[in-house]
């Protein structure tokens, strides 16, 4: 750790918190600063679209650590000020308040931000969902709404639609693809997800896009590509996310759908990345990856911290992710490439308890379980490295 007197972690996220805690646990005793753009203690994001939105959790329950934990580990928190620039040669990070922080080691964990439609976001009642503030604003809107339209049937959109429907609202889920999450899991699993939602009363409109949001000050309707108008008191735009790398433009750091890293999470001399913002070479699968899932944030934060301290072990995980919708717990390990073969290996989608295997050229590269936690944990051992 010689010469490593100042470490800065930008991003008060799950990846960022794991990074600083791993540094301390591994014996780093130098100055350690955690920077976050929100004026709030770091919190967990997955519960926002489920427990917080449904009202079963208060926001305080999402905190990753109590405030005292950072002081106890001698971690300096700089919250409420986003990073706005990086000087690679001078090893300085600039914040939105003009402050410059020098570093010997830097970990970037700035995550992603929601994509937005090119129209309509000025209207009251139109929401995105990323922060705890977003979740509370959306929940407040749902409590006063009668009709909700969710634009985008990915993980976030389907989870939020399930939560809104559980609150008894009239919910319409719109997506240009033929089935929700088909691009992730294939048609058979996607058809089961679609059936789950329609059986619970969600109106599913697939194969159609959105061309406009209407209202005078507040949203009242969503216009589809065929001209149909859907009444809506609340609209959630859940059309994906993009890595937060604009503050790195012109820094010289390699950027391409995230911060480009080698197999050890290193992007440049003294600079590393972890979590949703990192795009790294995963030698287990022989490919560049950027994984927007919670478990990866934790594992990659640990890996980046250890690389910063001198380890050169490649970060080669089998990705793990899950989604909870109504009474379905869907868990997945590995990768699910487009065009891969997805077959049900155990159980039946009709019984809502099954395990499916995703294969490429005869190799199992992904395993999905639907209400089958024990079996999917066993079958994940079938995933074959490249």
Image (cartoon, rainbow, N blue to C red):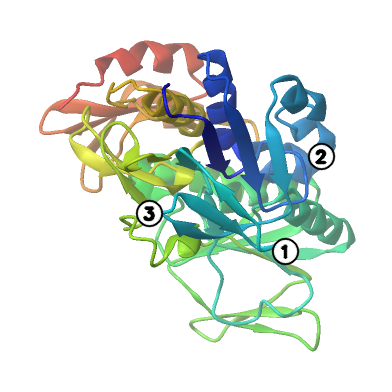
Q: Earlier in the sequence, mark 2 or mark 3?
A: 2
Above or below, comparing residue 30 to residue 207 in the picture: above
Q: Is residue 3 above or below residue 247?
A: above
Dot 2 crowding, Cα within 10 Å, few <14, some 14–19, many 20+: some
Local packing at callout 1 (Cα closer than 10 Å; few below 14, some 14-19, many 20+) is many
Q: Which residue is mark 3?
A: 89
Report if residue 57 is visible in the image: no
| Contact between labelled residues 1 and 2, with CB atoms less than 8 Å apart | no
Q: Secondary structure at mark 1?
A: strand
The quarter of the picture where residue 224 lies is bottom right
- Of tags 3 and 1, which is closer to the observer? 3
Q: Nearer the viewer, mark 2 or mark 3?
A: 3
The quarter of the rendered structure image containing the N terminus is top left
Residue 104 vs residue 328, the one in the foreground:
104
How would you rate the neighbour count of disc 3 (Cα within 10 Å): few for under 14, some for 14-19, many for 20 or more? few
Left or right: residue 216 versus residue 315 is: right
Q: Nearer the viewer, residue 233 or 65?
A: 65
Residue identified by numbered label 1: 148
Residue sitting at x 30%, y 31%: 264
Secondary structure at badge 2 equals helix
Report, in whole angstroms, how far the alpha carbon at label 2 lies from the one at label 1: 23 Å
Q: CA distance from mark 2 to mark 3?
A: 40 Å
Q: Nearer the viewer, residue 79 or 209?
A: 79
Label 3, label 1: how far apart the Cα atoms are: 50 Å
Residue denoted by label 2: 59
For the residues bearing labels 2 and 3, Cβ distance under 8 angstroms: no
Q: Position of residue 83 (x, y in %)?
A: 58, 56
Q: Point out residue 323 in the picture as x, y percentages from the top left corner.
A: 55, 36
Q: Residue furthest left?
A: 361
Q: Nearer the N terminus, badge 3 or badge 1?
A: 3
* Residue drawn where x is 74% and y is 72% of the image: 232
Please tell me which residue is depicted at 34% across the width and 18% down the height of the picture.
380
């Amino acid at each position: 750790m010689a010469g490593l007197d100042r470490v800065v972690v930008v991003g008060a996220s799950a990846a960022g918190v794991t990074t600083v805690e791993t540094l301390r646990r591994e014996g780093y005793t130098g100055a350690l600063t955690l920077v976050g753009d929100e004026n709030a203690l770091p919190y967990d994001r997955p519960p926002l679209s489920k427990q917080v939105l449904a009202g079963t959790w208060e926001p305080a329950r999402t905190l990753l650590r109590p405030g005292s934990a950072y002081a106890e580990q001698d971690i300096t928190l700089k919250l409420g000020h986003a990073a706005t620039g990086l000087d690679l040669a001078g090893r300085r990070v600039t914040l939105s308040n003009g402050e410059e922080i020098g570093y010997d080691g830097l970990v970037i964990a700035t995550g992603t931000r929601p994509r937005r439609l090119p129209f309509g976001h000025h209207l009251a009642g139109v929401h995105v969902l990323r922060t705890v503030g977003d979740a509370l604003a959306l929940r407040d809107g749902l409590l006063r709404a009668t009709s909700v339209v969710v634009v985008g049937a990915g993980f976030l959109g389907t989870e939020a639609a399930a939560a809104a429907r559980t609150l008894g609202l009239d919910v319409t889920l719109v997506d240009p693809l033929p089935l929700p999450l088909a691009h992730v899991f294939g048609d058979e699993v996607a058809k089961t997800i679609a059936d789950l939602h329609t059986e619970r009363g969600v109106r599913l409109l697939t194969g159609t896009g959105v061309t406009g949001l209407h209202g005078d000050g507040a949203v009242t309707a969503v216009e589809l590509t065929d001209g149909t108008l859907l009444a809506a008191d609340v609209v959630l735009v859940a059309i994906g996310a993009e890595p937060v790398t604009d503050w790195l433009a012109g820094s010289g750091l390699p950027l391409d759908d995230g911060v480009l890293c080698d197999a050890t999470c290193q992007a440049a001399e003294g600079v590393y990345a972890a979590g949703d913002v990192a795009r790294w070479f995963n030698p287990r699968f022989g490919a560049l990856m950027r994984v927007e899932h919670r478990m990866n944030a934790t594992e990659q934060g640990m890996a980046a911290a250890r690389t910063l301290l001198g380890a050169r072990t490649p970060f080669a995980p089998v990705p793990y992710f899950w989604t909870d919708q109504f009474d379905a717990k869907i868990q997945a390990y590995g990768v699910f490439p487009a065009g891969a073969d997805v077959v049900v290996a155990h159980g039946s989608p009709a019984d809502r308890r099954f395990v499916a295997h995703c294969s490429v050229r005869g190799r199992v590269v992904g395993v999905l379980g639907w209400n089958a936690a024990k079996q999917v944990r066993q079958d994940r051992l079938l995933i074959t490295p490249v």
